[in-house]
Every structure is written in C-alpha cells, then in structure tokens.
Image (cartoon, grey):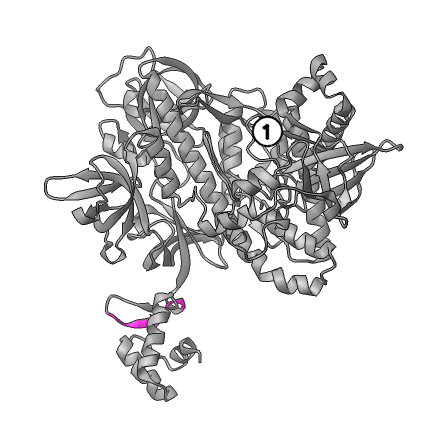
Amino acid sequence: MDIVKIIREKKLIYLTIDKLSQQLATILNENKLELKQQIVSLIHDGTLFLDENKKVSISADKGYFKAKLTLNKKGYGFARVEGYNDFFIPAYAINGAFDGDDCLVEIINQKTPEDIEGRVVSILKRNTTHIVGTYIVGKSKNVVFPDDERLPQIRIFKNDALNANNNEKVWVEIDMDTISDSSMRGKIIEVLGQANTPKAEQLSIIRSYNLKERFDEKTLQDAKKINQNIEISNFKNRQDFTKQKVITIDGEDARDFDDAISVERQENGGYKLYVHIADVSNYVVENSALDKEAYFRGTSVYFPNQVIPMLPKELSNGICSLSEGQNRLVLTVIIDLDKDCNVLSSKIVEGIIKSAHRMTYTEIKNILLGDALLIEKYQDVYGDILAYQEISQKLLKIRKTRGEIRMNLPEPFILENEAGEIVSIEKRFQDEAHEIIESLMILTNECVAKKFYDLGIPFVYRIHEKPDEEKVSRLSNILTNMGISNQLLIDGDKPITYQKLLERLKGTSKETTLTKMVLRSMMKAKYSPNCLGHFGLASEYYCHFTSPIRRYPDLLIHRIIKGYINGVPKNDLVLKFKNFVAKASDQSSETERVADEAEREVDDYKKALYMTKFLGQEFTGTVSGVQEFGIFVELDNSVEGLIRLESLPQDEYVYDDLSLTLKGKNYTFTIGDELNVIVANANTRLRQVDFDLAGIERTLKNCIVKKKNTNKISKNKKYQNKNKKTNRKKRK
C-alpha cells in the first residue's frame, strides 16, 4: 500500500495527521490508528512533511529533499542529496542543525546543475549524541562548553557530573529531548583529564570524531584465537614464494607491513614483478566480529604519537604483518613487463612468503647513492634494488606521458620524545626510495582494477573525478591575474594540463602555495562501485588493493578476488557483493574523511602547542594566503599563522581575491612574499597561531580594506580593523 501515492492522487493535502488518517481509513477501509502510525513514521523519515501549522504534505511535492548534513567549523556546510551534487548550505541557512544530522533541505539558489545553494527546512534525526567539552563549575549552575563552538552549552546537574572537577575535559551524553539553539542538558560519561594538557586534548579530539582506540571484548577474543604460526605444509594449495628474495620497504617509524616485493629479470630485458600483499581476508572472516569492527572503523588513524588501528594488534602487528624471517600468507600479483615496463600480462594467486629483509626508505636511498657499507650488507638483494629503480623510473615516464599530476608537497613530521614532548616539527619530502614503492603499488592497483572491471564482477574502485568547472574557472582567473599563463579554461578536464601548469610553477616563490591551490581546486578521491577513473593519476582503472591491514576497501576486494580465483561462479559473486560494495564504498569514504579531519586537527593542536615555546621570537616565513582580514604566513617547519589586519602597518589596502593581494599606498602583500614575523599568540584550544610583522611598530589607528571587483563579492566593501569581532568571526 503506497500511502504517498494515494495522498497525491486523492489530493489529501494540508490536513492534520488525525484528519489525514481518518480520510485514508475511509478510502482504504483500514484501521485509522495503524494508518496514523504509518503517517508519523513517514514524517520522521522525511517522506511527508509536518509544517508549523501541524498540516501534512508530501515533502517531494514541496521541493524538499532528504539529506545528510556535513558542517564546516567555519559555520557553513554541505548537504548530500541522492541524485544531485552536494548542496552548499550557508551558515544562515543551517537552522539549528548539527554536523551529521539527517535533514530536509530545499534549493534556494541554483545557477547550474553543479552549483546549488540550499537551506535546512527541518531536522529529521539528530546524529550528534555525544559531545566533548570543558566542564565549568558555576555559582548557580554547572555547564560544559563544547569544543565545537557551533554547539550550545550543556547544562550538567550534580548527579550527572561523574565527580568531574572544574576545568576538566569531559565526554558528555546529550539528553536528546532537551536540544535547542541556545542550550541542552546532558550527563558526563567520561572524564578525559585537565583541560589544556596534551593527553586530554588529543583524547578529546579522538572522542569528538567518535574514534575507538579500544576494541570490544568479542573482537579481541576473535583476534586472540588466531594461530600466530604458519606451517607451509598446511597450505599446499598456495604458491610457495619463500625461496624468493622478498623484501619490505617502509619508513623507520612504520607501524604495519602489508606489502612486500620481489623481482626477476627476463632474458628479453623485461621483468617479472611480484607484489605480495598480506592476506588479511584469510583471518577476518566475513560477518565476524572482526569484520564488522573493521567495516565500522573503515581505516586506521595515525597521529604523531599514536595509531588507532582498524584491526587488533594480533593481526595488524602480528600474523598479517609481513615481518622479516616469518612465513606469511599473501595475495600475490604477478606482473610481466616488457623492457619499457608496459604490462604484458598479470595474474593474482594465493601465496606464502618469508621476507628476507625489512628495509627502510633511508637505507634504499643511501644504497642508490652508493653507500658501500649498506650495499655490502644487502648484497643478496642489491641487484633487485637496482631493478626496482629501473622499473620505477620507466613507470614514472609512462605515467608522465599519459598526464599524471604530480604534487611533491611536503608532509609535516612532528617528532616527540618518550615523555610526549614535541622536540621538533619539520617538512618531509618524498625521495626516490618512496617513489619506488609508490610506483609499484600504483601499477599493482591498476592491474587488479582493470582485471575485475573486464570480468564485470562487483568491486570497490578508488576514483578521482574531474575538477568542478567553477573551481577550475576561478583558479584559472587567479593565475591569469598573477601573470601566469594557463590552459585551464580550455583544457581543465585533462590531467596533462595540470601537469604542465605545475611544471611551470617549479622553482618559483609561489610554487608551494599555488600547488596547494591547484590541489584544492580538484575533487577529493573516494571509493565507488563504479569505475570512473583516477584523474590525478590519469588512470582509467584504479582501486586500493595494497593495504588491507589499514583500509577496509582493500580487505573487501581481497575477499572478492579470492572468491573468483577459487572458482565461485560470477553470478554468485554478483548476487553476493553487488549491493554491499556500494554500501562499503560510502562507509569507507566517510570514515576516511573523518580520519583525515581528526589527523589534521591533532596536527594543528600539536603545532599550536609547539609554538607556545617561541612566543615573542622571530622567524622567517612565506605568505601562503591573503584575505581581507589579514595574511597567512607559513614557516619553514610547516606551521601556518595569521597576521591580522590590525597588526599590519597603517595603510589603506585594496583586497583583490583574483590576484590574492592586499595592496596599500605604502605596503603590498601577496602570496610568495618572504616576511620576518614574530610569534604573537599560540591558541591550543582553537588550534591557531598568530604572528606580528617583525620590525613594524603596531598602530592602534584604523586600517581600511576595500574589496576590488571580484567573484561573488560586492565592490568597495569596507572592513575596519577596529571591528575585531567581525575579523575573528570570519576566520572561524
């Protein structure tokens, strides 16, 4: 019985729930109370809409869409609507919704099918049930101030305080019946520690992203039952690679080892490459507690001093880790390459390996530089290492020819001592040793993806879609205003256009900043059941196969692959996995997003904490961003801070967001400028650092900024530096 269809056909609109259920009961000769319950259920799931006058209508007929809301900490957000590009939801149109809430939204402005602005009409389901904040004991009442400043304060009664003390970080369960725009009530379920201490702050971030650093008892029991020893005689159906010179190559601080390699040179100048990946699916049984927990987590999460693994240590650091000298079960991709490293054939087999050496990127780099002692130490695999170098260089040439976009941006590395104190923060770039492993893994992922695409078996692909046209247009205009010629407006849908642009930027003072802008103009890679290609790699077929210890999509496709190579009929695989690969793709994309945000927030906290040591000290940095409220400067150690407008020299500035310049009569600031700055403030709560210009006397007089004719922004809008509240609000 389709109630919505009947309501539409009979035009039963603008009726109360009671009257609608009565009329439906008469038409259908059904029980009124049961129909009333169905109507309420349809209102709750967003199919029907109950307006402020308590009248019912069909949501779709009013132009309302079901959506999940994702909010940025600056206040705006995006609504994911099935069948549409994400709706942009400005801060004023959030209407009390929280990040992650299920909502009804409507379109309030649509310029193109890709450019949609929406408004939250109603909240269907609150998905924020727990909040992290600071407990404050007051004279008349006790409250928790959430770390997320978008949320209202939480009233805590004494019996619900869990003996928390004033100014402690706490984990609060919200009373969902008390939520309003200005306040709500809750109870403390965990005390995390004194506010502003590193342990409590990092734990607060972990809780706020709903990450689980501990496994439940059932999952741990399943993990402990796994035999940690492998006898080759028990696996006669597997191909034995234990006599091969197999090696792993990872960082010195690597926490899991799920890929290994071996190689054979061919008489015709080609290569037979073996990429061995830990056979995690042999131990994580489908629908087991281990499998369900891995699906929920989706990915391992890495912090400077801590890892939250997807799988318990018995697997991630035990039987699944390809440790030196230990027999390990693997899925091996055997790839035949010609002398130029074009793929001749590939196949996937179940195998057993015994790693001959656990090598590091530093060792490989030094061997390639001719370190005699290391060459002697690894003499048995030295020839193989040279072969890997040859293969990597040839694969790089192939990828460059097809248009791969290479962004050699540094990664911040935060070094802490055993006491948890930050010793240093530095930038780390990839070197040739990293390139070798990356090239071999990209090749493997492509071979696996193409094979299963051709087979037509359900699969999880790693996709990177073409950039959004509006973002491409804006980036092109910015570059043009900077005097940088580009073809983005003409060929912005071709990876090689970006490759050539980045090559043009190499060695310039603006290289790093503009490379980051190019990156932000692109779509975010994600998982999908549809093979849509990888724009950044200029690859037609791509998946994630090589890290099943730390990524659920890899584990899932291992399960699919093993079903196929063990003779499960294609129709059975389609029936079994078709729906689940779509569900797992969405889940894994979301858990990856959450992990990325949590890792970034911990890094930002650590950076702010580190810079508290240097208040008043002078550094040299590069302007990395320009806004009407100030300029951002990045130091050599990757820490970025803001010089606020009121801290700039007195002047009348014109802000041009197409050349990213603040230009005054006497002073001009643009990206790429090198400046000497003084650390003025490091706010660990907001994860922010503020700088002052060195050698410039601060003035209390007003600076005025006028906006130049720019996209979506009115001309000559004034911003005065006395309006500090406005400036702070814009930054959040």
Dividing the image into 4 quarters, which one contains the C terminus? top left
User: Based on the displayed image, in which of its 4 quarters is residue 654 positioned?
Assistant: top left
Q: Position of residue 665 (x, y in %)?
A: 34, 18
Query: Which amino acid, by three-letter code, is at mark 1?
Result: Leu
Q: Is residue 405 above or below residue 467?
A: above
Viewer-side residue, 666 vs 235: 235
User: Which residue occupies the extreme left position in the image?
Assistant: 140
User: Based on the displayed image, in which of its 4 quarters is residue 16 positioned?
Assistant: bottom left
Q: Position of residue 516 (x, y in %)?
A: 51, 31
Question: Taking the image as drawn, is residue 260 in sight?
Answer: yes
Q: Is residue 633 above or below residue 239?
A: above
User: Which residue occupies the extreme right position in the image?
Assistant: 267
**Is residue 493 in the magenta section?**
no
Question: Taking the image as drawn, is residue 476 in sight?
Answer: no
Q: Magenta stretch: give its range.
A: 54-60
Tell me the SS state at disc 1. Answer: helix
Q: Residue at x 70, y 41 (%)?
A: 444
Q: Is residue 564 left or right of residue 506?
A: right
Name the residue tied to disc 1: 502
